[in-house]
Image (spheres, rainbow, N blue to C red):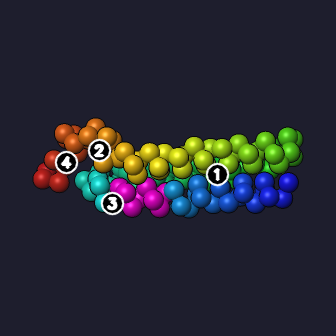
Amino acid sequence: MLVIVIVGYTCAGIQVAALPAIASTYAVDSYKPALGSIFVAITVNKNLWGYGFSEFITPWTESAGYLPAIMTNMCLTVLWCSFGFLFYFAGKNYFRKWTANSSIWTLDSQ
C-alpha cells in the first residue's frame, strides 16, 4: 500500500512540475509567436490540476481509500506522459504538419 502512495505522489509531482516545464520548453523552441497564449494555457492547466488535487484528494481518499484516488491519478499521469513518446517519435513528421501553413507564423511580422 505504501508503494502505491509513493508512486501516486510522484506522479502528482510529475504532473504539476515536470510536464509544464517540458511543454514550456517545446513552446519556446517551436512556437515563438504564440508564446504568451501558450504560457497562459500551461499555467491555467497546471494550477487547475494542483488545485483539484489539493482540494479533492483528501476527501476522496477518506471516503474510498488510497487505492482508487492514487491509482486514478497515476493512470492519468501515464496517459499524458504516453503522449510524450508519441510526440517524440512522430512529432516532426506528423504533428508539425498540422501547423506548417498556419497563420501563427505571420504574427512576428505584424
Please state which amino acid type lies under the numbered disc 3.
Answer: Val
Q: For mark 4, what is the residue?
A: 105
Query: Counting residues from the N terminus, which is met first, the one under dot 4 or under dot 3?
Result: 3
Q: For mark 1, what is the residue?
A: 51
Magenta residues span: 20-27
CA separation, marks 3 and 1? Answer: 26 Å
Select label 3 or label 1 by which is in front: 3
Select label 4 or label 1 by which is in front: 4
Q: Secondary structure at mark 2?
A: loop
CA separation, marks 4 and 3? Answer: 14 Å
Of helix, strand and loop, which mostly describes the magenta segment?
helix
Please rate how many residues cluster around mark 3, counting C-alpha atoms within 10 Å: few if below 14, some from 14 to 19, many from 20: some
- Where on the picture, by quarter, is residue 103? top left
- Where on the picture, by quarter, is residue 15? bottom right
Percent position (x, y) of residue 17? 56, 61
Residue 48 visible to the viewer: yes
Q: For mark 2, what is the residue?
A: 93
Please state which amino acid type lies under the numbered disc 1.
Answer: Tyr
Query: Counting residues from the N terminus, which is met first, the one under dot 3 or under dot 1?
Result: 3
Q: What residue is drawn where x is 63% and y is 60%?
A: 13
